[in-house]
Amino acid sequence: MKIALMDVGIGLLATAAAVRRLRPDADLVLSCDPDGMPWGPRTPEDVTVRALAVAEAAVAHRPDALIVACNTATVHALPALRARLEPAVPVIGTVPAVKPAATGGGPVAVWATPATTGSPYLRTLIREFAAGVPVAEVACPGLSDAVQDADEEAVALAVASATERTPHGTEAIVLGCTHYELVADLIRAAVQRPGMPPLVLHGSAGAVAAQALRRLGERLMPQAPATGGLAVLLSGREARLPVQALAYAEGRLLQPRRPAR
């Protein structure tokens, strides 16, 4: 089995690591777009063009499924990706985890890029799955770039800024950008306040990985032998994992024992 994942950058590491944990025997293809980074400020039409190119580079490696491990690409390009690739290659998008976060009754904060915050897509999720629950949308400019660069100081500054704009009493935070899941512990430590209930963070990586395996009719086999290979594509060029990826536990988990078949 081979699963491809796409994102503008290393935000896909969290979902790729989740796939690796659930199926250590699966081959992975990671397709990123450093030449087009960042996607957030681009128009929806431009994001779609870039996303299609990144997806097609991945599909050339003949995966059984493609995970769009990027909220911005899911918001703007998922219909085009599915129209281009399905049914030959199932395409699984990444949806901010508003629904599970809202089940606790709130208050909830959604941390996301400026491109996702306030988008009709996010507003629809909130309206459908969090009706009656207090939800604050918190734009986090610079956070995904800081995570991408593995710049600890810039990450800390961006997290501190978002924390200041997160309402007191927030009980759950939706990590509405896949990059944010790589620094989830830092976010929790920054936002958790003395005397408040334990803060719950809701990412999408685990649920998306499991959904991809379900779409393929594959079982979860976390005890399978660790035999899965890895291929990395940077704007279509075969490469190694970027050095920034190895700053995170998820990236270190993915270091290949062999190339993907």
Image (spheres, helix red, strand yellow):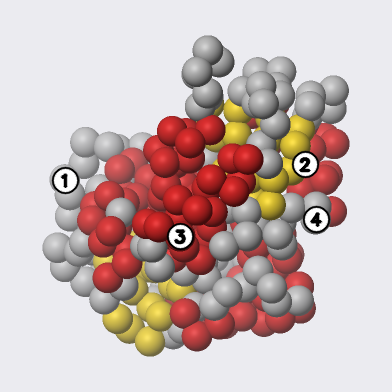
Q: Which residue is mark 4?
A: 119
Q: CA distance from mark 4 to mark 3?
A: 25 Å
Q: Amino acid at mark 2?
A: Leu
Q: Position of residue 178 (x, y in %)?
A: 52, 53
Residue 193 versus residue 237: which sits nearer the camera?
193
Q: Which residue is mark 2?
A: 125
Q: Amino acid at mark 1?
A: Pro
Q: Which mark is residue 225?
A: 1
Q: Is residue 162 left or right of residue 54?
A: right
Is residue 67 at least partly visible in the picture?
no
Q: CA distance from mark 2 to mark 3?
A: 30 Å
**Nearest-to-viewer mark from 1 and 4:** 4
Is residue 165 at least partly visible in the picture?
yes
Callouts 4 and 2 close, C-beta under 8 Å: no
Q: CA distance from mark 1 to mark 3?
A: 38 Å
**SS at mark 3 in the image:** helix
Q: Residues within 10 Å of mark 4 (few under 14, many from 20)?
A: few
**Nearest-to-viewer mark from 2 and 3:** 3
Callouts 4 and 3 close, C-beta under 8 Å: no
**Considering only order in the chain, which callout, 3 or 1, is on the residue closer to the N terminus?**
3
**Nearest-to-viewer mark from 1 and 2:** 2
